[in-house]
Image (spheres, grey):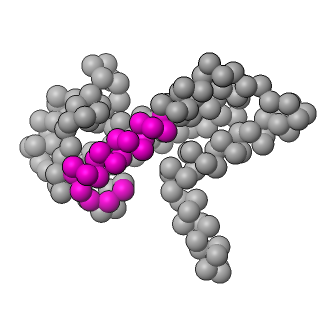
């Protein structure tokens, strides 16, 4: 494998690159083919795209500034972040991905994007469970108390 191929593969392994760049391009391309060069576009749903992306980006910056560590948990945080969006949901960055994907499905009236969303809901849930296990191991009772107080996905509900 060439260096360029390795770089492309590494870039594609990034969940954010796939969600916010690759998937929209694929959805648009597939919809253009399926609809013979036309594209259904419902502008009323575009705020979901902006909301999802901005939630992911801004919350990620917030977490890095306060919890340290790296993006994702490959470089674990030094402290639990329980303020900002993290006082409402334990996984606001993953939720941002899902909100964006919902916006993609609705904005382009795309079954392909809806399928991507349906595949990613359990994928992000499994990933959240894995992250939480790692955070429990790192922070013990402090993380347990946080998890007991803050819902995993939807504030006050789920």
Q: Residue at x 30, y 62 (%)?
A: 75
Q: Position of residue 87 (x, y in %)?
A: 22, 31
As drawn, 77 above or below 7: above
Q: Which residue is drawn at 16% across and 51% down?
A: 79
Q: Quadrant of the N terminus?
A: bottom right
The quadrant holding residue 40 is top right
As drawn, 73 above or below 36: below
Q: Residue furthest bottom?
A: 2
Q: Where is residue 102 in the image (x, y as percent from the top left)?
A: 56, 28
Task: State which region is magenta.
Answer: 52-71
Q: Is the magenta stretch mostly helix, strand or loop?
A: helix
- Residue 35 relative to residue 155: left or right: right
- Residue 141 relative to residue 82: left or right: left
Q: Any magenta on residue 62? A: yes
Q: Which residue is drawn at 28% across and 47% down?
A: 63
Residue 32 visible within the image: yes
Q: Quadrant of the C terminus?
A: top left
Residue 121 visible within the image: no
Q: Which residue lies furthest to the right in this view?
A: 36
Q: Position of residue 125 (x, y in %)?
A: 41, 38
The quadrant holding residue 77 is bottom left
Q: Residue at x 56, y 62 (%)?
A: 11
Task: Report how many numbered discs are placed on residues in the image.
Answer: 0
Q: Any magenta on residue 60? A: yes
- Residue 78 relative to residue 32: left or right: left
């Amino acid at each position: 494998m060439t260096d360029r191929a390795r770089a492309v593969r590494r870039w594609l392994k990034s969940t954010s690159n796939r969600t916010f760049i690759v998937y929209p391009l694929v959805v648009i391309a597939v919809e253009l083919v399926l609809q013979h060069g036309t594209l259904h576009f419902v502008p009323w749903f575009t705020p979901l795209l902006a909301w999802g992306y901005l939630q992911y980006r801004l919350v990620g910056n917030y977490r890095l500034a306060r919890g340290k560590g790296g993006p994702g948990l490959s470089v674990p945080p030094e402290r639990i972040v329980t303020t900002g969006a993290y006082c409402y949901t334990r996984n606001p960055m993953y939720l941002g991905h899902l909100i964006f994907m919902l916006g993609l499905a609705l904005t382009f009236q795309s079954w392909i994007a809806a399928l991507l969303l349906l595949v990613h809901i359990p994928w992000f849930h499994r990933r959240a469970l894995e992250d939480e296990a790692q955070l429990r191991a790192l922070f013990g009772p402090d993380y347990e108390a946080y998890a007991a107080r803050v819902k995993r996905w939807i504030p006050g509900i789920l």
